[in-house]
Image: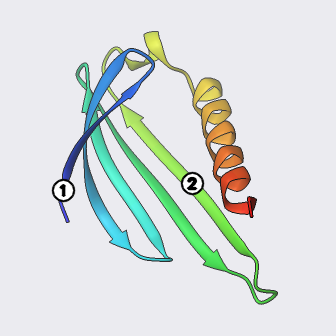
């Protein structure tokens, strides 16, 4: 674990590290950018009917974070993110 990677959200480069990698169960990473820190979890549950439930949780902290990002924006982004994953997973 603890594998570093860098990605871009809009115009901000974010340095992250995988914190938990449990295939078919959980993928969690932590990251930092512009003095803020975040943790993002993906939790996967196989249901009794054979379908899969994917939940995502994110927490962020930083002195100036509220000037750039609020909880409504985070919720909307996570909803889009999950929708994109669903679309990709359901493609033949």
Residue visible at 39% across and 19% down?
65
**The C terminus sits in image quarter:** bottom right
- Give the image location of residue 19, x and y in percent: 27, 60
Q: In this view, does 18 lie to the left or right of 46?
A: left
What is the CA distance from the residue labelled 1 to the residue labelled 2?
Answer: 20 Å
Check contact, mark 1 vs mark 2: CB within 8 A. Answer: no
Crowding near pointer 1: few (<14 within 10 Å), some, many (20+)?
few
- Give the image location of residue 57, x and y in percent: 53, 51
Q: Is mark 1 on a helix, strand or loop?
A: loop
- Earlier in the chain: of badge 1 and badge 2, it is 1
- Give the image location of residue 35, x and y in percent: 23, 22
Residue 76 quadrant: top right
Vertical comparison of 41 with 53: above or below? above
Of all residues, the one furthest to the top in this rendering is: 67
Residue on which disc 2 sits? 56
> Coloured how?
rainbow
Residue visible at 42% across and 76% down?
23
Residue on which disc 1 sits? 3
Vertical comparison of 48 with 80: above or below? below
Q: In this view, does 38 lie to the left or right of 87?
A: left
Vertical comparison of 85 with 15: above or below? below
């Amino acid at each position: 674990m603890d594998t570093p990677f860098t990605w871009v959200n809009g115009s901000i480069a974010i340095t992250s590290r995988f914190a938990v990698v449990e295939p078919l169960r959980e993928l969690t990473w932590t990251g930092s950018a512009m003095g803020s820190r975040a943790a993002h979890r993906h939790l996967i549950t196989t249901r009794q009917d054979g379908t899969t439930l994917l939940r995502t949780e994110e927490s962020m902290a930083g002195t100036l974070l509220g000037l750039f990002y609020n909880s409504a924006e985070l919720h909307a982004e996570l909803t889009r993110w999950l929708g994109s994953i669903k679309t990709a997973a359901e493609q033949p």
